């Protein structure tokens, strides 16, 4: 048996996406087609690693062909272009529903009373479990790549965030950068939350004001899908995300405005 095949079977080398699949993927995903050649090749390798290491499970009646699976892998790996495949650690399954899905929630209040309700979601990332996406919403993101949304990036931001054991809007970073990140993100989050609480209309998805981790995840979506608006609203945050994710496709650099900490 060839040595290269043995390494792939043992998990050492990802099976590359074939040229035909990669060409169809680029035609469908604006954010990927707009990357320079070097970053495209890096993403192609990461997507191959994703397909090797993760089980993609479509929920009936949804069926996914090879190109659709490759699209999901590449979208999930977009936030890992600079961070690397370490961002894939800690989970093994991507579950894909045909459309938005319902999740039962429960909470015990201070009086000891149990409250239960159903949430309708388009994506979810469990700390020690799978990443879950709505295929209909993935397709909607692909159809409007500049609308400010990318559910796959949003949920992957949560997966990266929690790698240090805490879901708090600050991913694993060198100490100095972590301090600068936490300071700048907290200031931006506080300003947005205050505006939403006051009933003001805000320019980005108000869901970002739910919690610091959601602010990070929503801003991550804007980094790829509407970076100009993110830079206008939160220049320090935009700079950190450019340093963390790399330059957004076809958008002038903002990283020069971020102190290294």
Image (cartoon, rainbow, N blue to C red):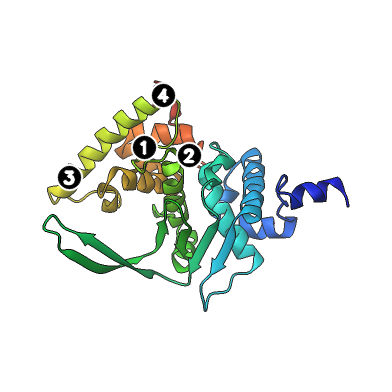
- Secondary structure of the residue carrying tag 3 is helix
Q: CA distance from mark 2 to mark 3?
A: 28 Å
Considering only vertical position in the picture, is 255 above or below 130? Answer: above
Q: 232 or 127: which is nearer to us?
A: 127
| Closer to the eye: label 4 or 3 | 4
| Closer to the eye: label 2 or 3 | 3
Q: CA distance from mark 2 to mark 1?
A: 10 Å
If the image is split into quadrants, where does the C terminus sit?
top left
> Marks 2 and 1: CB-CB under 8 Å?
yes
- Residue named by callout 4: 175
Q: CA distance from mark 4 to mark 3?
A: 30 Å
- Secondary structure of the residue carrying tag 1 is helix
| Closer to the eye: label 1 or 4 | 4
> Marks 4 and 2: CB-CB under 8 Å?
no
Please tell me the numbered disc located at residue 231: 1
Please tell me the numbered disc located at residue 48: none
């Amino acid at each position: 048996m060839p040595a290269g095949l043995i390494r792939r079977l043992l998990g050492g080398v990802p099976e590359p996406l074939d040229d035909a699949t990669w060409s169809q993927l680029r035609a469908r995903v604006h954010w990927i087609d707009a990357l320079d050649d070097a970053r495209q090749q890096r993403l192609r390798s990461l997507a191959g690693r994703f397909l090797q290491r993760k089980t993609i499970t479509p929920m009936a009646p949804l069926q996914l062909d090879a190109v659709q699976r490759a699209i999901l892998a590449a979208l999930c790996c977009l936030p890992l272009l600079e961070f690397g495949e370490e961002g894939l650690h800690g989970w093994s399954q991507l579950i894909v529903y045909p459309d938005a899905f319902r999740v039962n929630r429960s909470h015990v209040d201070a009086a000891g009373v149990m409250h239960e309700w159903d949430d309708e979601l388009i994506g979810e990332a469990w700390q020690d479990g799978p990443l879950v996406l709505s295929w209909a919403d993935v397709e909607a993101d692909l159809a409007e790549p500049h609308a400010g949304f990318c559910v796959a990036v949003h949920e992957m931001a949560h997966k990266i965030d929690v790698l240090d054991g805490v879901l708090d809007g600050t991913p694993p970073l060198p100490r100095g950068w972590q301090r600068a990140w936490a300071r700048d993100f907290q200031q931006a989050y506080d300003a947005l939350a205050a505006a939403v609480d006051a009933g003001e209309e805000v320019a980005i998805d108000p869901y970002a004001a739910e919690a610091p981790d959601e602010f990070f995840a929503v801003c991550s979506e804007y980094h790829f899908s509407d970076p100009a608006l993110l830079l206008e609203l939160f220049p320090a945050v935009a700079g950190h995300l450019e340093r963390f994710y790399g330059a957004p496709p076809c958008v002038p650099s903002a990283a020069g405005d971020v102190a290294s900490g």
